[in-house]
Image: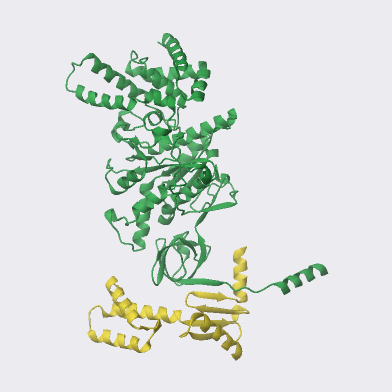
Chain colours: A green, B yellow
């Protein structure tokens, strides 16, 4: 005991009273998640401000005499006249593999009730995107498991591919399918002990969505076994506009960690239209000047600085990639509105979904004619390129001829054959939700279409043919599928084997 | 009272006119107020309201409030005053106040800068660290 007392006395004797300088201010005005604080002369842009009661704010407006702060928490607990102080820290979120399988909020705090998150590292929410020197060209594919996308609008690791369409056209479903596909591929590679395969971890950022919708997405990810490879970052519609504006940046920070540590990640922003609306709300409350559609002048910068963070970086700079799939919701198919045109110009391609196609039963309702992937073809699997190279042109030709054929019934044999082939291609591209198709199966199916195996099959039975063919190849020709997956290109020998298998199948199919 | 951007801009100009070597000149401030009132313009009240706010902020910026649990001895007051003048330059007004709730030590505030060496401040920091 005496030793302990001596020890404490020695520590007291050696202790020096340090008085640190603090920068304080007074809350002058507060409301709707935004506060005006007088003072805080040393505040930095995007610095975290301690508002008391455990509530944090983010300095967004630095004026001569006051600072505009967005409040990240329950602003009703704060009052005018309260003291605020600078912290000298930028907004940070925890990062790392400990977040996989978890549902977190904008500050990286768990909201799934599964206990604290194991993470000893954090990344700033706002970070400068990698420059040209740090980047590498996109050359590895992201297999979405959605046939029209993998065949005609391929996405590469590090690419930014926009999903755009009206409400209820299947935008989220495409992204969820892609996440499920990644989880299946990751699991398969783990089971096979394939060390060359680079798993893709996914981050799903839900912005301004109903809690019930988010719960449904999480349930689907859990049911399909994709959750262990996925982080869900949530700011629901009931959250403050400040949180909804910041949540994509928090998700990007979590994705960047994978990119910086030699891993690949995919991030889905669902959706950026709602983020833009939240940012407009925050900006108007901060009394920033408004422009077109009342959005602030820097709304383009808001999206460009977010999407520029998706990249594939060189071996010296992390050797990883972050692929972004932002979603934009259009109003009545108007892609020439302010936010859609901005995001179209920022991304490396877009997938357009159409309501008309959706109700015609073409699901996913992708309009192949105006959808494009600007960098993905370099990343497409060679086997897929071999079989699907002509598909986009054939489909475009089919649509043109089909429109022309409506005026008369007398068509020459060649035109009729093109129309018939087009109908069958449209049919095989129909796909159920949450059911991604492995790339080898896609290659086989498209190869059979291109080689006329479906020409004699009635259009109404094309789907049945495709299902049986898939079943036949998975159960009886597993080795051939594995070979396609391994060799990644269709050589003469492989083509001969494919032909033999397809012939065998067509003989048995009735 | 709604203070328009124009009123704010004009008040800012008037405030800058009152600065001499970076310090507010009291005579100029009085003159400005008298002349603005004399013009009898419609937007005089908002201009003067914003001008008053700027003057108040300037005064706070050049006022050092030194709080302690017990009254400070005269020699210590001089040392503190000299130190603050050295750091913040001339034109600094010092005010000494007694605040028993600080328990011990001293708390100095100059504008937005706070140097909290009080026992209470230390306890609060300790509480936060837990």
Residue projecting furthest to the left: A407
Residue projecting furthest to the right: A2
Q: Is residue A71 left or right of residue A369?
A: right
**Quadrant in the picture for the C terminus of chain B:** bottom right
Q: Quadrant of residue A443?
A: top left
Rendered location of residue A455, percent (x, y): 33, 15
Q: Nearer the viewer, residue B106 or A301?
A: A301
Rendered location of residue A259, percent (x, y): 51, 44
Residue drawn where x is 58% and y is 82% of the image = B68
Residue drawn where x is 35% and y is 38% of the image = A350
Q: Quadrant of residue A332?
A: top left
- Count numbered badges in the picture: 0
Rendered location of residue A308, percent (x, y): 41, 47
Res. B73 visible in picture: no
Q: Nearer the viewer, residue A68 or A303?
A: A303
Q: Relative to A214, is A500 above or below?
A: above
**Quadrant in the picture for the N terminus of chain B:** bottom left
Q: Relative to A430, is A238 above or below?
A: below
Residue drawn where x is 40% and y is 72% of the image = A65
Rendered location of residue A203, percent (x, y): 48, 43
Q: Nearer the viewer, residue B1 or B27?
A: B27
Res. A117 visible in picture: yes
Q: Is residue A299 left or right of residue B109?
A: left
Q: Relative to A239, is B36 above or below?
A: below
Q: Quadrant of residue A347?
A: top left
């Amino acid at each position: 005991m005496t030793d302990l007392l001596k020890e404490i006395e020695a520590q007291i004797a050696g202790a020096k009273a340090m008085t640190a300088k603090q920068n304080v201010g007074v809350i002058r005005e507060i409301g709707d998640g935004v506060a005006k604080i007088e003072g805080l002369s040393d505040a930095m842009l995007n610095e975290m401000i301690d508002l008391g009661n455990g509530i944090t704010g983010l300095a967004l407006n630095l004026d001569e005499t006051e600072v505009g702060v967005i409040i990240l928490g329950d602003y009703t607990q704060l009052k005018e006249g309260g003291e605020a102080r600078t912290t000298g820290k930028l907004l940070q979120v925890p990062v790392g593999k400990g977040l996989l399988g978890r549902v977190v909020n904008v500050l990286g705090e768990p909201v799934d009730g599964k206990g604290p998150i194991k993470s000893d590292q954090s990344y700033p929410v706002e970070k400068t995107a990698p420059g040209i020197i740090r980047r590498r060209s996109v050359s590895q594919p992201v297999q979405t498991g959605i046939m029209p996308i993998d065949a005609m609008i391929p996405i590469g690791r590090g690419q930014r591919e926009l999903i755009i369409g009206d409400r209820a056209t299947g935008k989220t479903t495409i992204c969820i399918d892609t996440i499920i596909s990644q989880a299946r591929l990751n699991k398969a590679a783990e089971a096979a002990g394939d060390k060359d395969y680079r798993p893709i971890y996914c981050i799903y950022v839900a912005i301004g969505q109903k809690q019930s919708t988010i719960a449904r997405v999480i349930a689907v990810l859990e049911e399909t076994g994709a959750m262990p490879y996925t982080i869900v970052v949530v700011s629901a519609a009931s959250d403050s506009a400040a949180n909804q504006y910041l949540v994509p940046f928090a998700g990007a920070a979590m994705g960047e960690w994978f990119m910086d540590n030699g891993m690949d990640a995919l991030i889905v922003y669902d959706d950026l239209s709602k983020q833009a609306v939240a940012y407009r709300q925050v900006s108007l409350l901060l009394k920033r000047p408004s422009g077109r559609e009342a959005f602030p002048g820097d709304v383009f910068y808001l999206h460009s600085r977010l999407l520029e963070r998706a990249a594939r970086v060189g071996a010296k700079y992390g050797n990883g990639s972050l692929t972004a799939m932002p979603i934009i919701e259009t109003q009545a198919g108007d892609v020439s509105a302010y936010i859609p045109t901005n995001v179209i110009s920022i991304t490396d391609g877009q997938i357009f979904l159409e309501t008309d196609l959706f109700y015609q039963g073409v699901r996913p309702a992708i309009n192949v004619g105006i959808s494009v992937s600007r960098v993905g073809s370099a990343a497409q699997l060679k086997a897929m390129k071999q079989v699907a190279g002509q598909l986009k042109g054939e489909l475009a030709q089919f649509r043109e001829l089909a429109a022309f054929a409506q005026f008369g019934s007398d068509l020459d044999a060649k035109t009729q054959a093109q129309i018939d082939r087009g109908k069958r291609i449209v049919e095989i591209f129909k796909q159920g939700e949450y059911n991604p198709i492995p790339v080898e199966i896609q290659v086989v199916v498209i190869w059979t279409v291109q080689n006329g195996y479906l020409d004699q099959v009635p259009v109404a039975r094309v789907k049945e043919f495709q299902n049986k063919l898939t079943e036949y190849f998975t159960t009886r020709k597993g080795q051939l599928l594995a070979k396609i997956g391994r060799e990644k290109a269709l050589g003469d020998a492989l083509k001969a084997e494919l032909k033999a298998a397809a012939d065998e199948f067509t003989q048995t199919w009735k | 009272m709604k203070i328009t951007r124009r009123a704010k801009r004009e008040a800012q100009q008037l405030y800058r006119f009152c600065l001499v070597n970076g310090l507010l000149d009291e005579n100029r401030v009085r003159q400005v107020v008298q002349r603005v009132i004399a013009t009898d313009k419609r937007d005089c009240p908002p201009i003067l309201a914003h001008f008053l706010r700027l003057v108040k902020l300037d005064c706070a910026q050049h006022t050092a409030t030194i709080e302690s649990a017990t009254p400070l001895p005269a020699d210590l007051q001089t040392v503190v005053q000299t130190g603050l003048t050295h750091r913040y330059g001339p034109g600094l007004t010092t005010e000494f106040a007694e605040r028993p709730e600080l328990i011990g030590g001293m708390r100095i505030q100059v504008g937005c800068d706070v140097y909290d060496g009080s026992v209470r401040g230390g306890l609060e920091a300790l509480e936060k660290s837990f």
